[in-house]
Image (cartoon, grey):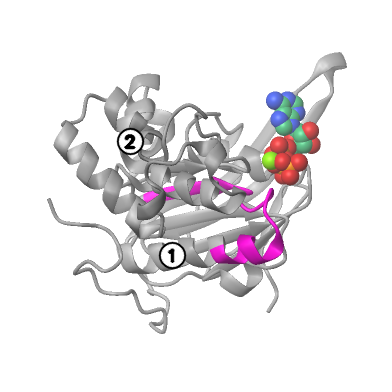
């Protein structure tokens, strides 16, 4: 199988290309009562991985009150594109990622992931899509402490009964990619915080996803280590052609992102230069 990782034959993606004229957001009818937003996506050319169209999310909580977590969000993601979404606590970042992953349903609007309307997939189909096409990262690395870095990276492939030789090859390749080949046999507590998060990147990539969703992956790291992690993810995005959507409180994301958005009280807008 062809390698997907940096250093492989895949060319580094160039971002000097003009925006593809065919990549305008699809017009969808605005749901009644949904707030209008001005969010417009200008993104690099590339295969479209994701279209979020006019997504509204309302949570009905106790006492009949409603929390509107997302207000008419539009977003596109392309292969090889490193997208960062900045927003304060409670702005709607995790809600948006959960809806993109099909873990939660929008109240209005739709999500087209890899050309498939998530609303038309049943739970088993969504689960299969997540396992094969999506990678996930979180604020904490969530490594199993009794397993080595290698075992943590290969765990999901093991649970999916992947061929052991293929699993081992991909695990070593993913660890090499994040610069941790020499730490493959360390258990999680024998790794620094930044190293643990690099293992988490390797784990997110080992099954060759097309899109990685990372919810505040630098939230527990010092700013220097956090910037290294962001730059590593961007390099992987460009060289392997994988899309990344990264949420963050961290102002440094602005230095790294190909496409930068702000989310405020559920409204997503392209960041001002
Ligand atoms: N299951 C839920 N039921 C009710 N309200 C919810 C639920 N999940 C999230 N919310 C509300 O939706 C809003 C957005 O929450 P979300 O978790 O998406 O924010 P966030 O940007 O990820 O914040 P943080 O940076 O603190 O993780 C918040 O006001 C939150 O209280
Ligand atoms: Mg969150």
Tell me which segment is drawn in magenta: 211-228
Query: 10 Å neighbourhood of mark 2: few (<14), some, or many (≥20)?
Result: many
Residue shown at 83%/15% (left/top)? 62
Residue 209 lies, with reference to residue 176, above or below; the image says: above
Could you tell me residue 200's position as x and y percent?
Answer: 48, 44
The C terminus sits in image quarter: bottom right
Badge number at residue 81: 1
Query: Mark 2, mark 1: which one is toward the viewer?
Result: 2
Left or right: where 73 falls relative to 28: right
Could you tell me residue 182's position as x and y percent?
Answer: 37, 53
Q: Earlier in the sequence, mark 2 or mark 1?
A: 1
- Mark 2–mark 1 distance (CA, rounded to whole Å): 25 Å
- The residue singled out by tag 2 in the image is 154
Residue shown at 61%/31% (left/top)? 107
Is any atom of residue 109 visible in this view?
A: no
> Element under label 1?
loop
> Element under label 2?
helix
Specify the farthest residue to the left. 1
Q: Looking at the image, which is closer to me, 167 or 53?
A: 167
Left or right: where 174 falls relative to 248: left
Could you tell me residue 119's position as x and y percent?
Answer: 44, 30
Residue shown at 43%/64% (left/top)? 81
Could you tell me residue 123's position as x and y percent?
Answer: 40, 21
Badge number at residue 159: none
Q: Looking at the image, which is closer to me, 227 or 189?
A: 189
């Amino acid at each position: 199988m062809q390698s997907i990782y940096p250093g492989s034959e895949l060319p580094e993606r160039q971002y000097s290309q003009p925006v593809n004229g065919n990549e305008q957001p699809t017009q969808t009818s605005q749901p009644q009562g949904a707030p209008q937003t001005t969010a417009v996506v200008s993104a690099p050319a590339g295969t479209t991985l994701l279209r979020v169209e006019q997504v509204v999310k309302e949570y009905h909580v106790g006492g009949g009150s409603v929390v509107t977590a997302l207000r008419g969000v539009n977003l596109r993601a392309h292969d090889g594109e490193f997208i960062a979404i900045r927003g304060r606590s409670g702005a709607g970042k995790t809600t948006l990622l959960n809806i993109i992953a099909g873990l939660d349903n929008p109240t209005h609007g739709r999500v087209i992931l890899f050309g498939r309307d998530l609303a038309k997939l049943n739970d088993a189909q969504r689960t299969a899509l997540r396992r094969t096409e999506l990678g996930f990262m979180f604020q904490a690395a969530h490594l199993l402490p009794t397993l080595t870095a290698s075992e943590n990276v290969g765990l999901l492939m093991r649970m999916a009964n992947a061929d052991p030789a293929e699993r081992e090859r991909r695990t070593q390749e993913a660890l090499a990619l994040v610069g941790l080949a020499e730490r493959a046999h360390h258990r999680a507590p024998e790794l620094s915080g930044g190293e643990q998060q690099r293992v988490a990147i390797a784990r997110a990539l080992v099954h060759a996803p097309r899109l990685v969703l990372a919810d505040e992956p630098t939230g527990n790291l010092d700013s220097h280590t956090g910037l290294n992690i962001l730059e590593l993810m961007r390099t992987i995005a460009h060289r392997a052609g994988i899309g990344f959507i990264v949420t963050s409180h961290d102002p440094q994301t602005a230095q790294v992102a190909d496409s930068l958005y702000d989310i405020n009280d559920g409204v997503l807008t392209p960041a001002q230069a």
